[in-house]
Image (tube, grey):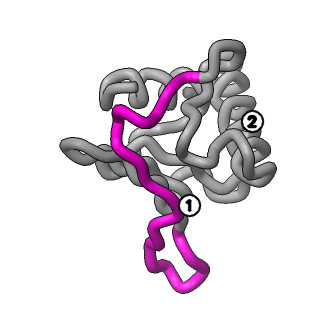
């Protein structure tokens, strides 16, 4: 997947742009990123914010090694498909985005 494909996928799946990075937020604090996708020139990193406020690299891979799942479209190779906590967080963010569009609060 390319940088643009990853960004498009993220934005279509509940991620929001915070400080220039596609990010997932806490349900209790939708303006504060706790997971972000850092898109560099040749690689993508998934970083997780620690309770102390410091960002820690969780995983990373070159764009050439990240592929979209044929059924779900989720990027494979970054761990987003295998960590239940990520799937749940993405679903909560996606649900919040859909609800905001329905109520006009988006």
Q: In which quarter of the image is the N terminus?
A: top left
Q: Which residue is drawn at 72% across and 25% down?
A: 99
Q: Are marks 2 and 1 in contact (CB under 8 Å)?
A: no
Left or right of 13: which side holds 92? Answer: right
| Residue 19 locus on image (x, y percent) | 32, 51
Q: Residue at x 74, y 42 (%)?
A: 87
Q: Is mark 1 on a helix, strand or loop?
A: strand
Q: In this view, does 84 lie above or below 32?
A: above
> Which region shows up in magenta?
49-68
Q: Is residue 104 magenta?
A: no
Extreme residue in the bottom direction: 52
Q: Which residue is drawn at 23% across and 42% down?
A: 42
- Of mark 2 and mark 1, the one earlier in the sequence is 1
Q: In which quarter of the image is the C terminus?
A: top right
Left or right of 89: which side holds 74? Answer: left
The Cα atoms of the two marked residues, 2 and 1, are separated by 14 Å
Question: Is there any visible trace of residue 32 in the rendered image?
Answer: no
Q: Residue 91 carries which label?
A: 2
Q: Nearer the viewer, residue 79 or 19?
A: 79
Residue placed under numbered mark 1 in the picture = 34
Q: Which mark is residue 45?
A: none
């Amino acid at each position: 997947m390319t940088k643009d494909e990853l960004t498009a996928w993220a934005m279509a799946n509940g991620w929001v742009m915070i400080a220039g990075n596609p990010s997932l937020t806490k349900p209790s604090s939708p303006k504060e990123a706790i997971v972000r996708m850092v898109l560099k020139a040749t690689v993508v990193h998934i970083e997780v914010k620690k309770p102390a406020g410091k960002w820690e690299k969780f995983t990373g891979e070159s764009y050439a090694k990240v592929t979209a799942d044929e059924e779900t479209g989720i990027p494979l190779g970054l761990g987003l498909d295998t960590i239940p906590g990520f799937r749940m967080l993405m679903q909560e963010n996606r649900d919040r985005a859909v609800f905001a569009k329905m109520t006009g609060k988006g």
